[in-house]
Every structure is written in C-alpha cells, then in structure tokens.
Image (tube, rainbow, N blue to C red):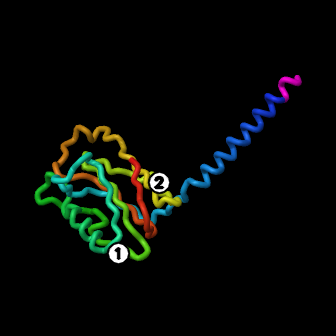
Amino acid sequence: MKALIPLLAGIVVTGCREAEELQDASAETGLEIQVIRSYHGRLELDLTNQGSGLSEVIIRSQADYEDFLSKIPKRQITRIKPAPPSEDPLLKQPSIDFKNSMMLVAIRSDSMYVAPEFKSITSDKNGLSVRITDPELGDTRVLNQQEGIGTYQAVIIPHREGLITFIR
C-alpha cells in the first residue's frame, strides 16, 4: 500500500500537468472567424500558370474583385447551342464593402464539377489560418472535363490585416 501512494501521487501530478498544457495550447488556438457569405461555381483558369492545380486568392480591393469576376464564365458549360447564361450568383456582382470585408477564394483546377471547401478560418496572434479540403472526385472523375475550366469557392469574411496561411 505504501508503494502505491507515490505512484498514485505521480499519476495525479502528471494528469494535472497535461491538463494545464492542454489549456495553454487551447489558449493559443485561434478564434473562429464568421463567414458572412459563401459562393461557389466554375472559373476560367490561367493555363500558363498552373502548378499543382490548387490555388488560393485573397481579394481586398474592388479592382481585384472585378478581375476575379472576369474569370467566371458568362455562359453555362454545356453542349447545348447556344449555351444558356450562367447562373453563378457572383455574376450579379454583389456589392462588397472592402473597407470592412475581404474575400478568400479557393480554386480547384482538376475538376469542373467538385469545388474545394473552406472547413475553418481562425485568427490567432500570427494572423489567419484557413483550412481547405478538396472533396473526392467520385463519379465525376470519368466525366468529360473542359480544359481551362475549374471550380472555386469564395467566402466573404471581416477584413483582416496580416499573414494569411492556407492549409490544404
């Protein structure tokens, strides 16, 4: 019994130390940033600058926003002639107050059917951390893909300065 007392005391002390470390670690993790609006659709890709097929864009000005909008196809990608107008809601050019908001865009160039997804956007002392996933292509892998067309997801968040780290 006497031999168990130091062992139990060691377990209790170790358990408390781990709990304190967990609290310190959670204090360093960021606060979740609220997404104001989200959009997704198809995008004309720049085929001259296509590395991994994945990319991210930070839009903090009206000029950058208009440049991004110019890459959204105006007509649906279809075999129907003439193709009907695109239903992408960003083509209606919703107003964004870039003094108070900004847009983050995740682009996927390996599929015109499956868009990337923002999983979390957190803020900490180092800036923003943005987690993005690229869902499996599933049955769309065998569908015809038009070269030069990819997908995007864009989110509007409150304006932030500083480093933005994208994690895929």
Which numbered disc flags the more N-terminal residue, 2 or 1?
1
Q: Answer whether residue 85 is visible to the viewer in this image.
A: no
Instruction: Give the SS element for disc 2.
Output: strand
The circle drawn on residue 25 is: none
Label 1 sits on what residue type? Ser
Residue position for label 2: 120
Residue 7 lies, in percent from the top left, at 79, 28
The residue at which mark 1 appears reads as: 95
Say if mark 2 contacts mark 1, CB within 8 Å. Answer: no
Report crowding for label 2: few under 14, some 14 to 19, many 20 or more residues within 10 A (C-alpha).
Answer: some
Q: Say left or right for 72 vs 157.
A: left
Q: Main secondary structure of the magenta part?
A: loop
Q: Position of residue 121 (x, y in %)?
A: 47, 57
Q: Quadrant of the N terminus?
A: top right
Q: Is residue 2 magenta?
A: yes
| Res. 36 visible in picture | yes
**Residue at image x 36%, y 44%?**
135
Q: Which residues are magenta?
A: 1-5
In front of the other: 100 or 115: 100
Front-lying residue, 150 or 165: 165
State the residue lying farthest toward the right: 2
Q: Is residue 160 above or below residue 142?
A: below
Q: Nearer the viewer, residue 69 or 19?
A: 19
The residue positioned 17% from the left and 49% from the top of the image is 146
